């Protein structure tokens, strides 16, 4: 693959910022919104709650939440979406009441929301889960110190949403530091919130009476989409410049690619990746940011199939995120999984086969596998990829990939 690719807005920031707009007693204009199915679904959900959305082209939306009139989200809408849990924090902050079905999303084993609930309760809310629905309500939300037992992106953002209009100060300790946590805090601040420390271990939220909105905010580039293209470039021995990104967000991947003998050149808003013949074996452990992202773990496993010797990947975030490896094995990969560790023997030239995506990032990884494999690969369940990648097929085609989308 050769050429330039432009990265879209970050999915995991967009799915937090759109619910965050429900806290605004006014209008907000959001730019660089990725055109992906998770965002489209959220837009339908917030319209059902009474928000008005207007579009300016494909990637800018204007959300007017002044006439929001419901704190109840329907099961049909939220069942397949993990990020629907942000509706709890946002509606609790707005109405002091929220009724939202327990979140769905990709299956990585047990995905609890106990830290979200613990935090809402610390702010004074009563939270009950009955018949698959999370009921949260409070007379008054009052700022309170919250210590997260595990570093959780979702809990950190959700508690910012719930605390932004609470009375007093809420310090969230052991907070997640991912770029989308910082982006959500920046969005809320642009709309009138008072949040300090996002991107560090302690975030301090001083409650304000109102978020007036009236501002324009541009979502950061998608770190995981950028990483997917960087890995695809290395795996195909290509020469690809990944543009419209924040290279700092890519540091953990860049360091590993260099260790693997891939040439990486970075400059301001782009990173150029030039793949070579030989990929060195490496050991990787996924961790919360600034560690190596779990959302790039499957894509990296595909690249490591080409490495010389034995590489290992330890999954440090999710209990079970190696289901896609059975599909890679069907393509000839030599990988053994023991608990949270995958041991990859290389180099292996994968061979094309009919395969099946089981979640979003695994889907993207299997696309890369197909691009590097000998012969034709047919990938099924591509609706998972549509959840988080804008125009993946077209972007790959422009780089010279031989890939066609076949809709049923
Ligand atoms: N956890 C708890 N209790 C909680 C919350 C989390 O024990 O209340 C545990 C989880 O079980 C997991 C760890 O904490 O072991 C981290 O979970 P986290 O809450 O950070 O994950 P999340 O917010 O549900 C987001 C991304 C995921 C990404 C993870 C980790 C969104 C919408 N999703 O999930 O992204 O894997 O952070 O970085 O932001 C993806 O984009 O494909 C994706 C799955």
Image (tube, rainbow, N blue to C red):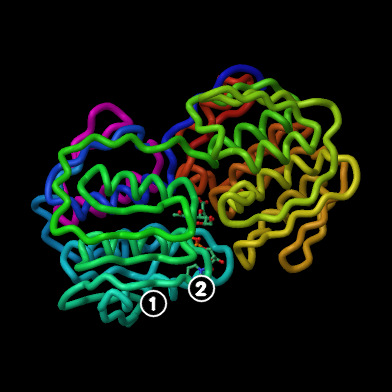
Which stretch did the figure color magenta?
Answer: 34-62
164 to 356, vertically: above or below: below
Residue at screen point 48% across, 26% down: 244
Q: Residues within 10 Å of mark 1 (few under 14, many from 20)?
A: some
Most foreground residue, 283 or 55: 283
Q: Is mark 1 within 8 Å of ligand 1?
A: yes
User: Mark 1 sits on what residue?
Assistant: 118
User: Mark 2 sits on what residue?
Assistant: 149
Residue at screen point 76% across, 32% down: 375
Left or right, residue 215 beside residue 397: left
105 to 263, vertically: above or below: below
Residue 40 horizontal/vertical position (percent): 33, 44
Mark 1 in CB contact with mark 2 (< 8 angstroms) = yes
Q: Secondary structure at mark 2?
A: loop
Most foreground residue, 15 or 375: 15
Splitting the image into 4 quarters, where does residue 91 fall? bottom left
Residue at screen point 31% across, 51% down: 42
Q: Is mark 2 within 8 Å of ligand 1?
A: yes
Splitting the image into 4 quarters, where does residue 143 fall? bottom left
Left or right, residue 275 beside residue 365: right
- The N terminus lies in quadrant: top right
Residue 80 horizontal/vertical position (percent): 41, 59
């Amino acid at each position: 693959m050769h050429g330039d690719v432009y990265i879209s807005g970050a999915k995991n920031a967009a799915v937090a910022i759109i619910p965050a707009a429900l806290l605004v007693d006014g209008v907000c204009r959001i730019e660089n919104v990725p055109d992906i199915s998770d965002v489209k679904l959220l837009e339908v959900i917030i319209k059902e709650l009474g928000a008005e959305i207007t579009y300016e082209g494909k990637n800018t939306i204007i959300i007017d939440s002044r006439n929001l009139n419901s704190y109840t989200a329907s099961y049909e809408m939220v069942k397949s979406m993990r990020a629907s849990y942000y509706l709890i924090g946002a509606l609790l902050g707005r109405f002091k009441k929220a009724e939202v079905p327990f979140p769905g999303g990709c299956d990585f084993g047990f995905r609890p929301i106990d830290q979200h609930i613990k935090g809402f309760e610390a702010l004074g809310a009563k939270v009950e889960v009955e018949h698959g629905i999370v009921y949260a309500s409070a007379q008054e939300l009052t700022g309170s110190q919250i210590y997260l037992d595990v570093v959780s992106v979702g809990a950190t953002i959700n508690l910012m949403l719930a605390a932004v209009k609470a009375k007093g100060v809420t310090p969230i300790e052991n907070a997640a530091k991912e770029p989308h946590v910082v982006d959500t805090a920046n969005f809320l601040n642009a709309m009138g919130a008072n949040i300090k420390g996002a991107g560090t271990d302690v975030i301090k939220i001083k409650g304000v009476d109102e978020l007036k909105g009236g501002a324009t905010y541009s979502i950061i580039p998608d770190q995981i989409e950028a990483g997917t293209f960087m890995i695809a470039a290395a795996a195909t021995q290509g020469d690809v410049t990944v543009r419209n990104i924040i290279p700092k967000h890519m540091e953990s991947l860049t360091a590993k690619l260099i260790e693997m003998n891939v040439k990486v050149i970075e400059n301001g808003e782009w990173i150029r990746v030039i793949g070579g013949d030989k990929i060195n074996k490496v050991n990787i452990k996924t961790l919360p940011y600034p560690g190596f992202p779990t959302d790039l773990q499957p894509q990296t496993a595909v690249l490591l199939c080409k490495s010389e010797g034995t590489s290992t990947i330890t999954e440090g975030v999710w209990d079970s995120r190696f289901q896609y490896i059975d599909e890679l094995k069907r393509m000839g990969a030599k990988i053994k999984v023991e608990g949270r560790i995958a041991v990859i023997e290389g180099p292996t030239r994968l061979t094309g086969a009919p395969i099946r995506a089981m979640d979003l990032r695994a889907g993207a990884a299997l696309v890369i596998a197909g691009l590097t494999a000998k012969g034709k690969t047919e990938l099924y369940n591509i609706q998972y990829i549509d959840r988080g990648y804008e125009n993946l097929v077209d972007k790959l085609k422009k780089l010279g990939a031989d890939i066609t989308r076949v809709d049923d």
